Image (cartoon, helix red, strand yellow):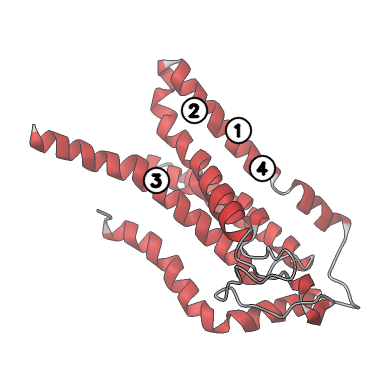
């Protein structure tokens, strides 16, 4: 069972998205129009660099998590770090890989800003809550942002820092995910690749995924151990 403090970690993003929803279409189009000028979305060396290399920190975190996981099976010294290595690794695989990229981006059917008629494309605007699973005139993979999910994978470090009561790690994960997520979100919106809500949902899905594995690995294990002791 989730404690009230843990429930709030799940509910606050959900409530925030619920409150944002009535204004989401206006915000999405206003921001897309801001970046669209003289018939083109933005393109420069800075944006191209972030597009090409902005996901590298997320991959580095994942590789370190995998390394710690392997070491935990090779030497007893590293065994205590196994659950902490699993959180970012599973958040990346399930959150960024399965949920964001394979399940939603490939099937939700939301056109990117640059695919809209208003911006030189052939499709009409579609808010995030109106999926188009079966009648896509072209591949429409705007929702949610895969690039941003790679930045928000650092939210897993926030939860690890919270679990270990290490404030430096907590804030390192928080600020890194915020900075990387914001930079990648800005890049993809400026390039006409994603809407504002695509970025928001990338953050939400990665946060909920990290929370789920934090609960599964730690809270549920503690509950099971307590149950076993009571039944002995």
Give the labeled residue for mark 2.
Answer: 69
Lateral position of residue 129 relative to residue 208, left or right: right
**Label 3: how many residues lie within 10 Å, few (<14), some (14-19) or many (20+)?**
many
**Label 1: how many residues lie within 10 Å, few (<14), some (14-19) or many (20+)?**
some
Where residue 136 appears, as percent x and y from the top left, is 69, 70
Q: Mark 2 and mark 4: span between their CA atoms?
A: 18 Å
Give the labeled residue for mark 4.
Answer: 57
**Label 2: how many residues lie within 10 Å, few (<14), some (14-19) or many (20+)?**
many
130 or 28, which is in the foreground? 130
Q: Residue furthest right?
A: 38
User: Which of pointers 1 and 3 lies earlier in the amino acid sequence?
Assistant: 1
- The reply to whether callout 2 and callout 3 are in contact (CB within 8 Å) is no
**How many numbered marks, from 0 up?**
4
Element at label 1: helix
Where residue 212 appears, as percent x and y from the top left, is 40, 50
What residue is shown at x 9% (from left), y 36% (from top)?
231
User: Which of pointers 2 and 3 lies earlier in the amino acid sequence?
Assistant: 2
Q: Is residue 135 placed above or below 25 in the rendered structure?
A: above
What residue is shown at x 55% (from left), y 27% (from top)?
67
Q: Which mark is residue 63?
A: 1
What residue is shown at x 38% (from left), y 66% (from top)?
11
Q: Mark 1 and mark 4: span between their CA atoms?
A: 10 Å
Q: Which mark is residue 214?
A: 3
């Amino acid at each position: 069972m989730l404690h009230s403090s843990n429930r709030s970690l799940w509910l606050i993003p959900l409530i925030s998205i619920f409150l944002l929803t009535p204004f989401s279409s206006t915000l999405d189009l206003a921001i897309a129009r801001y970046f669209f000028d003289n018939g083109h979305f933005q393109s420069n060396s800075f944006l191209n660099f972030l597009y090409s290399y902005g996901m590298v920190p997320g991959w580095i975190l994942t590789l370190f998590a995998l390394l710690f996981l392997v070491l935990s099976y090779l030497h007893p010294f590293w065994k205590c770090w196994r659950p902490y290595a699993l959180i970012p690794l599973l958040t990346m695989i399930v959150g960024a890989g399965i949920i964001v990229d394979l399940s939603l981006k490939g099937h939700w059917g939301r056109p990117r800003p640059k695919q809209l008629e208003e911006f030189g494309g052939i499709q009409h605007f579609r808010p995030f809550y109106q999926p188009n699973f079966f009648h896509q005139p072209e591949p429409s993979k705007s929702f949610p942002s895969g690039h941003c999910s790679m930045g928000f994978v650092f939210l897993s470090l926030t939860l690890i820092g919270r679990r270990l009561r290490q404030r430096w790690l907590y804030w390192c994960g928080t600020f890194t995910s915020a900075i990387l997520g914001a930079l990648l979100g800005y890049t993809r919106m400026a390039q006409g690749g994603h809407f504002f809500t695509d970025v928001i949902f990338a953050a939400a899905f990665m946060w909920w995924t990290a929370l789920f594995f934090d609960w599964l690995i730690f809270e549920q294990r503690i509950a099971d151990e307590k149950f076993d002791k009571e039944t002995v």
